Image (cartoon, grey):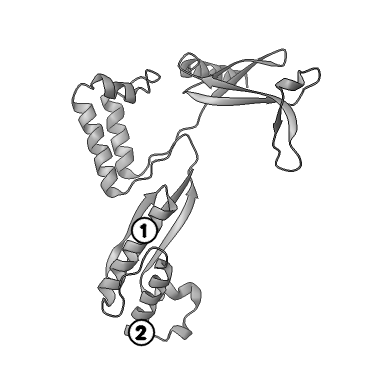
Amino acid sequence: MDIFVVTGTHFSQPYTVTSYHADERVADVAATDLVNLLRADLDPETLPPVDASNWRLGLVAAQCRRLAIQGIDVGDIDHDAFADTAGFDVWVEKVEARGLSALAVDDRELATVVAALRGHQRRTCPPDLLDIATNGGAYVPLTDDEIDGLCERLSCGTLTPQDVNVVVELDGGLVEGIVADRPIKVRVVDYDVEGADPDGLVLVPQDKGDSIPAAASGWGVDSICVDAEWITRLDAAIASEN
């Protein structure tokens, strides 16, 4: 999943404004708002608001105006030092969020999320919300201490996706079962198709070259196959053997 990070600095403010968005168009709108704020604070008469399609040009025009006010010749400035010399900048970075999920919220949305968690913590959860909190009974609800920790991580910006632990059980070269520490879906692809029924094969795309026939199956690891404790014991046995 791609996350778009919008960052802006202001010529009269020491702090940096940052927001996170799951949609590039929404990120462009957020960047446009920052640029228009800069233009309005700098010179609203000669720098009217711009739209989301040309916020980058609007930013450059504002930086040139700032340099002109300071009596600095634009031609004397290296391109890489343009923003630093002007004293402000706005930029959008696309980052890949690895893991099961990613939280992309601005400060206002984050405040609502934390408030909802605190409200959930302070009163008995009604059945409909409990079903959501447990993903239909797949998870054990968070304890008060765990909610405290989650709120702290959210507020501090240290929420990171956890690793997924998956165990594939084989017997005679055949997949007999898959165990995970949370509900997931696993696809098993077997390229050993000798003697297999051609009607049961699929063409699996390859990074390079044509697709290759293979036997493919999907495993839905639901609540029955979720056993984090067993995986922990397996890891301990592997560690002791090593």
Query: Can residue 70 be seen?
Result: no
In the rendered structure, are the residues bearing label 1 and label 2 in contact, judged by CB atoms less than 8 Å apart? no
Q: Tell me residue 34's x, y (percent).
A: 32, 63
Q: Position of residue 25 (x, y in %)?
A: 42, 55
- Looking at the image, tell me whether mark 1 or mark 2 is earlier in sequence order: 1
Residue 116 shows in the view: yes
What's the mark number on residue 29? Answer: 1
Along the horizontal axis of the image, is 137 left or right of 210?
Answer: left
Residue farthest right in this picture:
194
Q: Quadrant of the C terminus?
A: top right
The residue indicated by pointer 2 is 68
As drawn, 91 above or below 132: below
Residue at 42% over, 62% down: 91
Residue at 35%, 53% in the rendered image: 19
Please state which amino acid type lies under the numbered disc 2.
Answer: Ala
Q: Amino acid at mark 1?
A: Val
Which mark is nearer the camera, 1 or 2?
1
